[in-house]
Amino acid sequence: MMKRQSLTLSLLMGGLLLAAPLVAQAGGTIKGKVTFTGKVPPPKEFAFSKFPNVDFCKKNTSKSEDGETRLLKEVQVDGSKGLKDAVLAITSIKDKAWMKGFAKAPAQKVMADLCEFAPFTGVAVSKGLFYVENNDADLDDPKSKEGVLHNPHSFDQLGAKSSTEFNIGLAKKGSKLSKKVKLKFAKKGSVLRLQCDQHEFMQGWYLPVTNPHYATTAADGTFEIKDVPAGKHTVAVFHPSVAKQARGKKAMTVEVEVADGGTAEANFEIK
């Protein structure tokens, strides 16, 4: 009887020892804030009258007081100088198995809603799928009752250099595209830029990532990346207006060390 009890206890202890590393592998958290301390540039202005679907696009709240001009607010800062829509990503990890999964599923879903691409910033995976869906229809316009035509045009953008990834019209509400993007300039620091050929003010920027450890800042500039493997990591920040590249010579990065179950801090100041 004693031998059986000893064997059972040993098996239980062995099971605990095997399970322990699985808990440890949960990793830690990286928290921080991105602040913008420079002079906030004014929003870009686009006269609604120069583009189709004027009355429908005017329903978007990002417009001038008289309602005639669409305002594209690329830099949005709160009272604490926190920068909204900055993308943070760990660049020191390349998870090939994770990246391969996006050959069959999109890494980012973008919606065209009230003549605006949302989210404005996000991520992309090189050699993975990118998804855009049209959610717009104007019931007050017979020509656009079934859908407001949007034409998502994406570019692999590296500074002034760019290469088209896809350029496809979405004519009806509910129409969508899911296209593979190669992003051949990604290793040098490129990003995926999205713009509607019908409505120039519809724009979006998406950072190529190589692992699932990324986040986008909230309205107050704060972010949190969970389940980060323990160890030393490089964290980069990207914002379409003030940090065109998140890798390469122009990268804005910080080095952090993450402990299992711990929280590391990474803060960025953009001028």
Image (cartoon, helix red, strand yellow):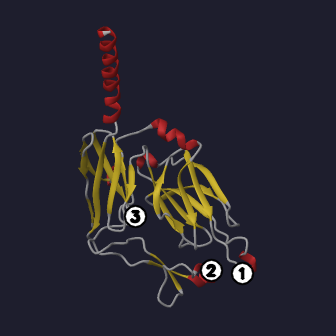
Contact (Cβ within 8 Å) of mark 2 with mark 1: yes
Dot 2 corresponds to which residue? 56
Which residue is the extreme one toward the front? 1
Disc 2 marks which amino acid?
Phe
Task: Name the residue nearer the viewer: 54 or 26.
Answer: 26
Disc 1 marks which amino acid?
Asp
Dot 1 corresponds to which residue? 141
Relative height, residue 227 to residue 222 (above, below): above
Which residue is the extreme one toward the right? 142
For numbered disc 2, what is the local secondary structure? helix
Q: How much space separates mark 1 and mark 3, taking CA atoms?
A: 33 Å
Q: Quadrant of the C terminus?
A: bottom left
- Estimate the x, y position of residue 247 in percent, counting from the top left: 36, 50
Disc 3 marks which amino acid?
Asp
Q: Crowding near pointer 1: few (<14 within 10 Å), some, many (20+)? A: some
Give the residue displayed 32% in from the left and 64% down from the top: 221
Q: Earlier in the sequence, mark 2 or mark 3?
A: 2
